[in-house]
Amino acid sequence: MPPEAVLLESRAMRDSVMGRTEVLDKVKALVLLPDGVHATTEGVADYFVVHNEAIKKLTQRHRTELVCNGLQVLRGSDLRLFERDNLSLSKQSYPQGRAHLTLYTRRTILNIAMLLRDSEVARAVRTYLLDVEERGRVGVPRQAESGPTLEPLDHRLTHVESSLADIGPVLRDLAPVIGRISVRLDRLDRRVDATNRVVCAMSLRLSDLAEDVRELRYGPRPLPRPHRHPGSRARRRDQG
């Protein structure tokens, strides 16, 4: 089974399983508005056991993707008509005279489950979703509790081919992230090289300063006397 993080990082992977909305009720009972189609932000937050603000922020970050999967915002006459037909019959409390209302379908809520990180319910939905998807892809029933059984070779080959087919879209989604990391590492390498050059220059400068301080304290070093052969003085005396 692919890791749960694949759904969090890859929209292509999320799109491939977006039709599995039945897993929502397998994990936890989903309470919808009287129309049986939509839920409010409060209802979605209750399902995932998170604060309303967590759903609002996630909706803002991924609005384009969520709109493609059923998210809609009602205003004006559409909002008043919907409130009259649905919210007035719902047990959920709602503020009167609101300017807009965000609605989520089952497909939208499943999309949120694949994006929401800090929710045990969302994590359970992702795990169940991947398990159901893998069993459907392989085309064999879940292993019995009495013990594991070996899949036929053709089933295993089909599983491998399907897994390989999923790698391409995932890598395409991860390519921009890897590219940004590579650029940052290159910048870091250049900074380290520049820092090394500065440290080397400072080391040479400190060595020069140490020599200057020594000369100020003890005077300049005497020049070395030229080396003479022991017999040179005797030859000069003979010549004299």
Image (spheres, grey):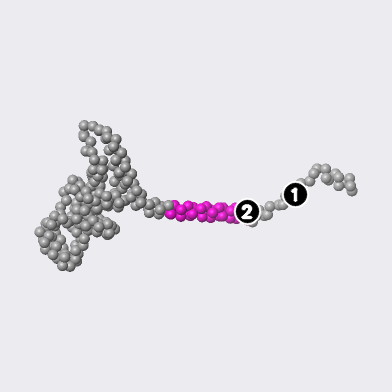
Q: Please identify the quadrant where the N terminus is shown.
A: top left
| Mark 1 and mark 2: Cα distance apart in space | 21 Å
Q: Is residue 19 left or right of residue 205?
A: left
Residue 99: percent from left, percent from top: 19, 66
Q: Quadrant of residue 44?
A: bottom left
Q: Quadrant of residue 84?
A: bottom left
Instruction: Label the magenta part by its dominant secondary structure.
Output: helix
| Residue designated by label 2 | 211
Q: Residue at x 38, y 52 (%)?
A: 175
Q: Along the polypeptide, which appears first: circle 1 or circle 2? A: 2
Q: Residue type at mark 2?
A: Glu
Q: 154 or 181, which is in the foreground? A: 154
On screen, residue 33 above or below 138: below
Q: 39 or 57, which is in the foreground? A: 39
Q: Crowding near pointer 2: few (<14 within 10 Å), some, many (20+)? A: few
Looking at the image, how many numbered discs can be counted on the residues?
2
Tag 2 secondary structure: helix
**Residue 61 disc label:** none
Q: Residue at x 31, y 39 (%)?
A: 157
| Residue designated by label 1 | 225
Residue 9: percent from left, percent from top: 32, 51
Tag 1 secondary structure: loop
| Residue 194 magenta-highlighted | yes
Q: Residue at x 20, y 57 (%)?
A: 104
Outermost residue toward the top?
Answer: 146
Q: Crowding near pointer 1: few (<14 within 10 Å), some, many (20+)? A: few
| Contact between labelled residues 2 and 1, with CB atoms less than 8 Å apart | no
Residue 54 appearing in the image: yes
Q: Which residues are magenta?
A: 183-212
Residue 92: percent from left, percent from top: 13, 57
Residue 59 appearing in the image: no
